[in-house]
Image: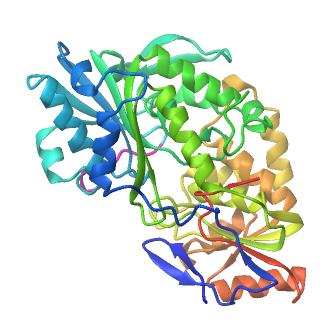
Amino acid sequence: MLTTLPYHKTQLTLPIEPGPKVRILTPSNHDYTPEGAQEEIVRRALANPIASPPLSELVKGKQNIVIISSDHTRPVPSHINIPLMLEEIKKGNPEAKVTILVATGMHRPTTPEELVDKFGQKVVDEVPIVNHLSEVDEDMIFLGTLPSGGELWVNKVAVEADLLLADGFIEPHFFAGFSGGRKSVLPGVASRKTVMYNHNSTFISSPYARTGNLENNPIHRDMLFAAEKAKLAFILNVVINAKKEIIYAVAGDRVEAHLKGCQFVRDLVAATPIPGDIVISTNGGYPLDQNLYQAVKGMTAAEASAKAGAVIIMVAGCSDGIGGEAFYHQLADYPSPQAAMDTFLATSKEDTPADQWESQILCRLLIKHKIIMVTDPKWAQAVRDMHLDYAETLEKALAKAKAVKGEEAEITVIPDGVGVIVG
């Protein structure tokens, strides 16, 4: 039985067969069978909102309704979610003006082609869509001070809505605990200065800012506050499988519905570590593996199942490159990961530069482990500049790893590093 690993929009075949020294780490419920087709699952969630009136009731009397929706870096099946949300809105208030605000966070704007791919041509033609631009200060409104002390600035399109809604999905997140819910506001549609304060080095270093954990998580605490101040009234969040198909959905209150969805994900994807001398991970394929920046998430799953000094092999297509100049230079401009880490930890919360949080986590991994990237050859030099190793194929990566750990090394394979909670 050969194992395949998602890579961009295709797959790579693991060149070794599972056995006593090659073990596959997947959640115990990875073969979960959903109750009904995708659209049926979403309709059922909307018909049974958690701690909230139905959406068709909430929209009554509202004239300016805004739906925050994830951007091109997230595999949210918005082409299913958004039309069903619009259907509920029209049922309760056919005259309401609806705007979609794309939660780009700190990412680049979603292109017209990507909008069509994400929402479908009909939605793009009929509904105004606005890309959030975090660096445009005049687009933001001040909403107070975060529990952590930072300033909360949120996109005025969201703040000025009569009713603020959000479409998204829930998966394990490597420092916010889980995606979805409150993350639609912060970092989704918050200003650059707010995001950078929330993602400061002290919070990223917190032992509570880890995959699958919300309790005492300082990043999550700020995000909850931001969603409350922005008056996020209703969410539709889905859970997807490895094929990017909806298998579960929650709708309703931004806190209660999200918590129920998080519990479902925790029960679904929790996995016991299989300590390995060599750990192979992925980012679940496109769109989550479109750059090295995003691929750090899958590496943290490998970290959670790696022996001391293990070699991590990360498989990611990186069709969109490294993930930004700032991210590149935050590692490449330093002689070692430790030198970069020392700089990050000495940076004040107010002065957190863009992408430092991702660089900090990557440095944490590189200080403990050798990391080999299997990706497009065009990024080989950039990968090496950032203190990772590079291999063009899985075969070559394994040969390099075994040269370090020996031919008898125990190998752990994580086919979907962003779809598992290891611990």
Q: Quadrant of residue 293?
A: bottom right
The x and y percentages for residue 265 are 56, 48
The residue lying toward the viewer, choosing from 328 and 73, is 73
In this picture, residue 220 sits left or right of residue 318: right
Image x and y of residue 404, in percent: 88, 80
The boundaries of the magenta stretch are 107-115
Q: Is residue 61 magenta?
A: no
Identity of the residue drawn at 85% across and 56% down: 367
Residue shown at the point (57%, 71%) measured from the top left: 379
| Side of 37 relative to 219 (left or right) | left
Instruction: Specify whether residue 112 is painted magenta.
Output: yes
* Number of numbered discs: 0
Up-down relation of residue 392 to residue 300 (above or below):
below
Instruction: Residue 190 in the image: state x and y as whole percent.
Output: 47, 27
* Residue 379 sits above or below residue 150 on the image: below
Question: Where the N terminus falls, by quadrant?
Answer: bottom right
Is residue 206 toward the left or the right of residue 199 in the image? right
| Residue 115 % position (x, y) | 27, 50
Q: Is residue 191 visible?
A: no
Q: Residue furthest front?
A: 35
| Residue at 37%, 26% in the rendered image | 234
Snapshot quadrant of residue 353: top right
Q: Is residue 99 left or right of residue 150?
A: left
Q: Is residue 266 above or below residue 145?
A: below
Identity of the residue furthest to the left in this view: 95
Residue at (85% x, 42% y) in the render: 342
Res 310 seen here: yes
